Amino acid sequence: MGKIRPITELSPIQLDALREIGNIGAGNSATAFAQFLGRKIDMTVPKVNIVELSEVPELYGGADVPVVGITLRVLGEAPGHMLFLLEQKSAFKLLEVLGMRVSSDSFSDMEVSALKEIVNILSGSYLSAFNQMTGFVLIQSVPAFAVDMAGAILGVFMVEFGQMGDHGLLVETQFHVDQEEIRGNLFFIPGQGSLDSIIKALGLGACYDDNSG
Amino acid sequence: MTIIRVKMADLNVIESPGVLITSGLGSCIGVTLYDGKKRIGGMAHVMLPDSTTMRSQTNLAKYADTALELLLEKLSKLGVERRRLKAKMAGGAQMFNFDSDNDLMRIGARNTEAVKKKLEECGIPLIAEDTGGSHGRTMEFYTENGLVIIKSVKMGDSEL
């Protein structure tokens, strides 16, 4: 792993590079998602969000709003996490599209398993594009699932950033399933030490060093 | 009635009948200190266990050890005596279950231990806690009577 520097020192070119990874990664995810569901998928242009840690629990509709979060650990040259966040009603809709009956307000084991599998596919295709771009061999862990307050879920991913500074970095893309009220946000959350590796792999290491002052 | 929202890695103090609220505690810890005689209380939303091993020291409210020191300092400025303080805490959950001992994922338990250790060092009794598990919590602290309400999506509401 490379040097660790505050996120706030990233240059505009480096932020663009992260956005480009988001673009290609999420583009690949959207294609896989569309094939899996047999629906058209719209996606937004990925954003690189640099957020103050204190603001994180308030993001995505408020700290108390219950959401579904499915996460995988990313292992390899640029460790971090993938996180898929969606509102409960979107998750129920998604299961309906898959032909699974939703009988209650909670998720059955089978439904949890189906949602995990979707995120497995989204994340796998994201990372495979990422690997092609960088020459990395990133792999992912099995997914973990939670239904809880958005703040409590997002907070988990800020712990590592908190050890180094007061900002977190999230590469975010929103997916929308055509003609259905299904929206979900896919995040790539690089670990602190991964930023330098990613930027070097994209040939932008020099730009990074320019910033060191 | 004044309501102050304490953000992540943040702390604050208030006098009766003020209310302190912190939302979305996952692996983080919400800790309250209360002087029942003066009816003054403080709350911190702690994110990490220990400041001494960390490179970033810009926000002291982030770590269990320094957050409690800072909170005690703020309370003493309001005329609160340490010996009258009683503590309550909530949070320290493990939101996702991975099959590993990854430090990041065990942070809830480490935060819980660190807050308890610091309270003991400061000689402040911990009179109630709702920690651990795998669910998020919101903590509301009423300085009028010291009551703490814990709200959660999975477990409903409870009193501390």
Image (cartoon, rainbow, N blue to C red):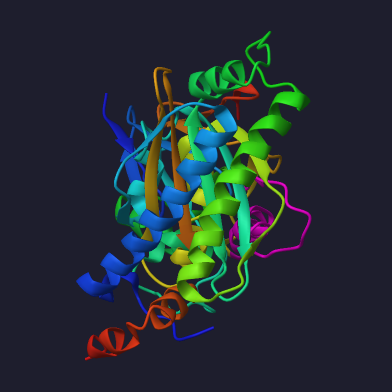
Q: Is residue B93 one of those drawn in magenta?
A: yes
Q: Is residue B49 left or right of residue B140?
A: right
Left or right of residue A88, residue A173 in this image: left
Task: In the displayed orientation, state which residue is furthest to the top.
Answer: A103
Part of the protein shown in magenta: B92-121
- Residue A82 lies in the magenta-colored region: no
Q: In the depicted view, which residue is nearer to us: B37 or A136?
A: A136
Foreground residue among B45 and A11 = A11
Which residue is located at x 26 percent, y 29 percent? B2
Name which quarter of the figure residue A138 lies in: bottom right
> In the picture shown, does residue A95 fall above or below A115?
above
Q: Report which quarter residue A122 is drawn in.
A: top right
In x, y percent, where is residue A93?
53, 18
* Quadrant in which residue B62 is drawn: bottom left
How many marks can you see?
A: 0
At a point 41% along the width and 83% down the height, the residue shown is A200
- The image quadrant where one finds the C terminus of chain B is top right
Residue at the spot 50% in from the left edge and 56% down from the top edge: B47
Residue B40, position as x, y percentages in the image: 38, 40
Percent x, y for residue A128? 56, 60
In what quadrant of the picture does the N terminus of chain B appear?
top left
Q: Position of residue B130 (x, y in %)?
A: 65, 37
Q: Which of A101/B131 is in front?
A: A101
Residue found 62% across the figure and 21% down from its top: A98
Q: Is residue B34 visible?
A: no
| Residue A56 falls left or right of residue B34 | left
Q: Is residue A126 above or below residue B17?
A: below
Q: Is residue A5 above or below residue B111?
A: below
Query: Can residue B98 be spotted in the picture?
Result: yes
